[in-house]
Image (spheres, rainbow, N blue to C red):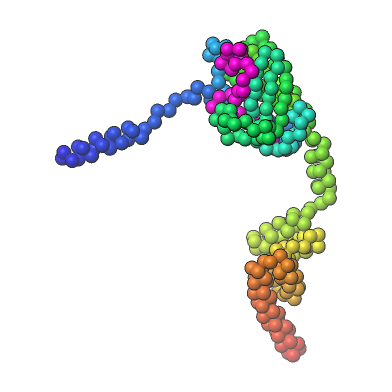
Amino acid sequence: MRNLFIALVALVFSVSAQAQITSPAPSPSCTMMQEVGMCDITLEYSRPSVKGRTIFAENGLVPFDKMWRTGANKNSMVTFSTDVMIDGQAVAAGTYSIFTIPSATEWTVYFYMDTENWGTPEAWDEAKVAATVKTAPINLDATVESLMFVIEDITMSSCNLELVWENTIVRVPVSMDTDAVVAASIEKTLAGPTARDYYLAARYYLDADHDDMATAAQWAAKANEMSPKYWQLRVEALILGKLKRYAEAIQVAKKSSTMAKEAGSDSYIRMNNASIAEWNKMLSGTEGKAQMGGAKM
């Protein structure tokens, strides 16, 4: 009985040690996404509050002329789904940390390639700076309690990325070449399906054992007319085999093997050889039956 009691006490203390108290975060995290033209802009950051404190000042919570993480906790981040221009500077699609140096008359905003920082980087690397923006802060009459990033003044090819907190707005212009993206999309669409489109459609019909294998054969042939690849030829051969067009299947499989040999893909050569042997047997059987049928006639 005593041993049982000791075991129960140990279990209670073990559970208590593992239990954790949960409570709201002082600076809750926020994720938001905004479409601008053909670009998705996603912001991930934490939102500290004023709580009666002075924020931007010489001796404020965020002192002037010192690097700031631009938020709380892990560094704030912005992701662009397409290439953009930040204040006229070309920035590739990707995710960037946002760091700032505030002052009374001018802020410096950095878009930094290293996003794995809790706060500011221990060693600043200028080579990782994708863009630097100098901008004058805008004073607000009202107080914004919780820090926020907003995307305003949205057009089909531009917007302003704004940081808003306490009595300050900091604005960074962002633009993108929407015309080029749309033009490329129009050109691709009007040009019709690509070889890959035809191949994927044919491959789906083959894998699904679709009833309309004849259409799949047309798609596969079209893919190989446009841009022959040994794996595409393999699919076309398999489709022809399913249609019992064995002689054609063998010829296409041989083409696949020739290209596979050039690419150093022994596995495709083995698969094609096995299929060719099977189709030759089927072809011989078909021809034999045809000859027997002719003799009866």
Look at 71% across and 65% down and name the residue there.
263
The residue at the point 32 percent across, 32 percent down is 16
Q: Which residue is nearer to you in this view: 162 or 253?
A: 162
Q: Does the magenta stretch include residue 51?
A: no
Identify which residue is drawn at 21% across, 37% down.
6
Left or right: where does residue 290 sit relative to residue 71?
A: right
Observer-nearest residue: 195 or 19?
A: 19
Does any portion of residue 256 appear in the rendered image?
Answer: no
Q: What secondary structure predominates along the stretch shown in magenta?
A: loop
Q: Which residue lies furthest to the bottom in this view?
A: 295
Image coordinates for residue 91, horizontal then vertical, percent = 73, 34
Q: Is residue 58 magenta?
A: yes
Screen quadrant of the N terminus: top left
Q: Where is residue 281 in the image (x, y as percent from the top left)?
A: 67, 80
Going by the picture, which residue comes out furthest to the left? 1
Residue 14: which quarter of the image? top left
Q: Nearer the viewer, residue 262 or 286?
A: 262
Q: How many marks?
A: 0
Q: Write down the region rendered in magenta.
A: 56-81
Residue in the image at 62% along x and 35% along y: 114
**Quadrant location of the C terminus in the rendered image:** bottom right
Where is residue 169, by image quadrant? Answer: top right
Q: Residue 220: x, y in percent?
A: 75, 62
Quarter where residue 160 is shown: top right
Q: Where is residue 40 in the image (x, y as percent from the top left)?
A: 69, 34
Identify whether 251 is placed above or below 126.
Answer: below
Can residue 76 be seen here? yes
